[in-house]
Amino acid sequence: MGKYSIKDLENLSGIKAHTIRIWEQRYNLIEPQRTETNIRIYDDSQLKKLLNVSILVNRGHKISKISKLPKEELKEKITEIYQKANEELLNETLEVQINALIVSMIDLDEEKFDKVFSTNLLRLGFEKTIVTVIYPFLEKVGLMWGIDQINPAQEHFISNLIRQKVITAIDGLPVPQKSSQKFLLYLPENELHEMGILLSHYLLKANGKHIFYLGQNVPFKDLIEVDKICEPEYLLTFMVTSKTQEEIQEYINKVGEQFKSKKILVSGSSYTLGNIKWPKNVSWLSSVEQLSSYY
């Protein structure tokens, strides 16, 4: 079971910490536990409730009325919104889809995941589903992982479901021409969270790029050898696992120095990479839209 600070809830729900405190005090909406130093601590059930409440508030429901709803009635209202979102699938309903994926991960609910994914796939197509739903969802998962507030089983569960979909889609794409731009995709040593780089593999290959995919946990010496053989124009990696700022900066500097003639793209959350000093040939991809500028 996850344990979240009030700042974590703010980042995951979009509701300001100050507002959450007011809702607690005025409406008894959620009841945090307290540490010995009187710091608020929240669990998965409270995060799920806040995600659902944020959906209702953003659609004009008054918090004073929401707070009085019995649990089953709150669930019914959210179900209605999910169904409407599945029917319309407008941009403003994507928040609903992403929150539903978070809940499916927390509950280990494959049926709910598959319903959300399949609905978006039918209406948006695979590439747009990745860009507008899956990537934003994984950014929130990355935040939860970065603060050590996600159960590894939950992350593995949802990652494997998405992984199956993406690998099947990659296999269905045509092989790009050898003359196309070459991208070397990999994860550094001790990085095992493959989802972001798999999704990038699909997007780049779907847009005609030649991909050399090394996968997880690649030793630096092996990266150097593969670079000599493949001679890619670009290296793309993700950094998700919690490391100190010094460790991250040291690795970024090392990559930039070793591959001076390459363009190196590094993705990861602002929690992980927000304060890094970037060498000239290394760029931070803070969003999937930035990746699209390379294809």
Image: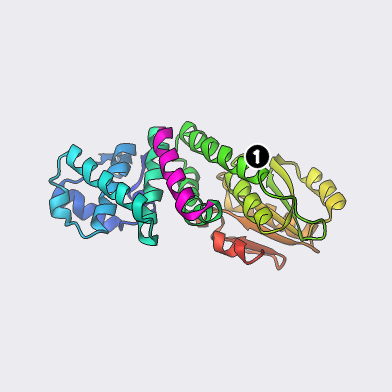
Compared with 278, 10 (above or below) is above
Residue occupying the point 20% across, 49% down: 24
- Span highlighted in magenta in the image: 108-125
Question: In the rendering, at what x and y percent does residue 145 appear?
Answer: 49, 43
Question: In the rendering, at what x and y percent does residue 229 appear?
Answer: 87, 50
Question: In the rendering, at what x and y percent does residue 272 appear?
Answer: 54, 53
Q: Quadrant of residue 71?
A: top left
Q: Quadrant of residue 203?
A: bottom right
* Disc 1 crowd, CA 10 A, few/some/many (<14, 14-19, 20+): few
Question: In the rendering, at what x and y percent does residue 169 appear?
Answer: 61, 45
Residue occupying the point 58% across, 44% down: 195
Query: Quadrant where the C terminus lies?
Result: bottom right
Query: Quadrant where the N terminus lies?
Result: top left
Where disc 1 sits, the SS reads: loop
Tell me the amino acid under the disc marked 1.
Asn
The residue that mark 1 highlights is 190
Residue 122 on the magenta span: yes
